[in-house]
Image: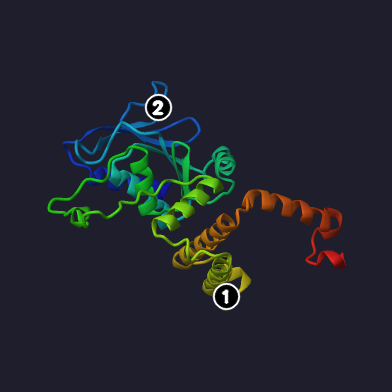
Amino acid sequence: MKRLALSLLALGLALPASAAEFYRWVDADGRVHYSDQPPPAKVKQMKRLNAAGPGSGQTKSGPPVTLYSGNCGATCEQAADFLRQRGVPFSVKMADKSAKLAQELKQRTGAMEVPVLFIGESMQRGYSPSVWDKMLEVAGYPGPAKKPGEKDHRAGRRRGRVSERLMAIATLPELAAAVRAFGRARDWQRYHTPKNLASALIVEAAELLEPFQWLSGEESLALPAAKREAVRQEMADVLIYLVSLANCLDIDLLRAAEDKLALNAAKYPVEKARGNAMKYDEL
């Protein structure tokens, strides 16, 4: 709560005096909302703020933006600051302050990790400014305002260069389609043979182990932010190569995983396997 108060103070100091009306309120479930629309009449905890004026990137269009946050330190603070600087109306749900919101987070994402951004039903776990920018762009929110004298780096692109637009991905089939399109745009199909992809997958899996080198089991559960981000990136590489291999061999990963779980359930019945790490033929 202290972090939230400091962030609000910073927000109030950073916004221009000539800006339009912007509202901050807390609903009955403890969720904090920011919007350019007045809150419902029954809301008692409401504060008027100055929002960015015309041309700053704020818009009334686009699906609702929700940030699930909590006690995750600088990462959560940066995530909220990013949305404020973009001038995007959004609501904050502090999952660590409410059991109801924690359960809602688990139901919507399948995990208890924060921050998580929802733009409509599009979801992104973890704070990634470049990905969040793309998600907001796809949803119809304009880009951030340029600072005086700031150049548009896109203006210098060569004629004929293909502009790539990365879409927000919410399901495994969507990821498979995005990975396939990414490779085709670069004419990489000739290299993406099953053997090459399997080899690349092993290399990336080995790199995933590097951030954990020489750490104890307890230390590996409490990675500093930089190492956790490195693990996140390597996990993404492993997943992308696995999906590429599945695309190449026309394998439905969800069905394959479902079938494998069924086989494992038969090999490792709960009454025999619970609480031990023995192989199935040793149970």
- Helix or strand or loop: what does disc 2 sit on? loop
Amino acid on which the number 1 mark rests in the picture: Leu
Reading the image, the residue beneath label 1 is 215
Reading the image, the residue beneath label 2 is 44
Residue 260, percent across and down?
73, 55
Observer-nearest residue: 225 or 27? Answer: 225
Tell me the quadrant of the picture where the C terminus can be found.
bottom right
Residue 2, percent across and down?
40, 49
Which residue in the rendered view is the most extreme toward the top? 41
Q: Quadrant of residue 44?
A: top left
Work out whether mark 1 precedes mark 2 in sequence or the reverse, and give the earlier one. Answer: 2
Residue 162, percent across and down?
30, 53
The residue depicted at 67 percent of the width and 48 percent of the height is 255
Q: Nearer the viewer, mark 1 or mark 2?
A: 1
| Marker disc for residue 62 | none
Is residue 280 visible to us here? yes
Amino acid on which the number 2 mark rests in the picture: Lys
- Horizontally, residue 218 falls left or right of residue 119, namely right
Badge 1: how crowded within 10 Å, few (<14), some, or many (20+)? few
Residue 54, percent across and down?
19, 36
Observer-nearest residue: 59 or 73? Answer: 59
The residue depicted at 57 percent of the width and 60 percent of the height is 245
Tell me whether circle 1 and circle 2 mark residues in contact (CB < 8 Å). no
The residue depicted at 39 percent of the width and 49 percent of the height is 166
- Distance between mark 1 and mark 2 Cα atoms: 50 Å
